[in-house]
Image (tube, rainbow, N blue to C red):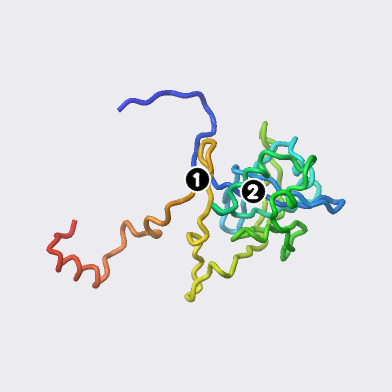
């Protein structure tokens, strides 16, 4: 099977479609859509967002050093798109989308109450890479919608129908295909009995 060579670019998809919320020194709150975001370190817990300097929220984050990464759901898709194509210079995105600003637990930035997970961040370093500047931040707190926590204390994010972004399109996720380590996990006694009863040989 052959391969067609394309010019270099960002083609690592899908990526999360998140809403980043922040507050300026004068108190104005804004939020914008970001796909260039992710985890960079476990200990200390760190994440990043990459933002174009011309975006309205860029200087708010640069000045205050705080922002919140709000994970999104399929139900939020229209609001997520709106916050990516409209500027906070021109419209009040909170009002136009109907999203609700809440109080973070530790950082001076709002959270999106409709979001299932809010990741509170404090900037540690800004890397001016080119078209985008990367805000490397330490995660100070995570707020989780208690409705997504089951009776065993497990976080059931799949129940929220998380939203992703892939090459210009917003996409839902079909659900979990397996848990971490399932490819090498030994079968349970119950599974072995079921396999024996069906007459199938172990592969």
Q: Position of residue 22 (x, y in %)?
A: 74, 51
Task: Report the residue that reaches farthest toward the bottom.
Answer: 151
Mark 2 Cα shell of 10 Å, populated few (<14), some (14-19), many (≥20): some
Left-right relation of 24 to 120: right
- Indicate the position of residue 95 as horizontal and vertical percent values: 75, 52
Residue 144 lies left or right of residue 88; in this view the side is left
Badge number at residue 134: none
Q: Earlier in the sequence, mark 2 or mark 1?
A: 2
| 104 to the left or right of 40 | right
Tag 2 residue: 79
Q: Secondary structure at mark 1?
A: strand
> Quadrant of the rendered structure where residue 127 is?
top right
Camera-nearest residue between 184 and 155 = 155
**Residue at the (67%, 32%) spot, across then down:** 131
- Image location of residue 150, percent across then percent down: 49, 72
- 164 is higher (above) or lower (below) than 189: above
**How far apart are labels 2 and 1 at the CA level?**
14 Å
Quarter of the rendering occupied by the C terminus:
bottom left
SS label for mark 2: helix
> Disc 1 designates what residue?
171
């Amino acid at each position: 099977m052959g391969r067609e060579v394309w010019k270099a670019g960002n083609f690592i998809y899908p990526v999360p479609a998140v809403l980043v919320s922040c507050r300026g020194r004068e108190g104005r709150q804004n939020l914008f859509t970001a796909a260039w975001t992710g985890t960079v370190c476990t200990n200390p817990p760190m994440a990043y967002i990459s933002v174009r300097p011309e975006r309205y929220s860029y200087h708010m984050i640069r000045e205050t050093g705080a922002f919140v990464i709000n994970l999104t759901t399929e139900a939020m898709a229209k609001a997520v798109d709106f916050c990516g194509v409209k500027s906070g210079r021109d419209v009040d995105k909170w009002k136009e989308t109907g999203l609700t600003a809440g109080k973070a637990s530790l950082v001076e930035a709002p959270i999106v109450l409709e979001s299932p997970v809010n990741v509170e961040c404090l900037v540690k370093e800004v890397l001016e890479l080119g078209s985008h500047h990367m805000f490397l931040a330490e995660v100070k707190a995570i707020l989780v919608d208690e409705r997504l926590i089951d009776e065993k204390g497990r976080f059931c994010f799949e129940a929220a129908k998380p939203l992703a972004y892939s090459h210009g399109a917003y996409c839902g996720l079909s659900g979990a295909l397996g848990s971490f380590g399932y490819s090498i996990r030994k079968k349970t006694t119950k599974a072995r009995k079921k396999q024996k009863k069906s007459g199938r040989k172990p592969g």
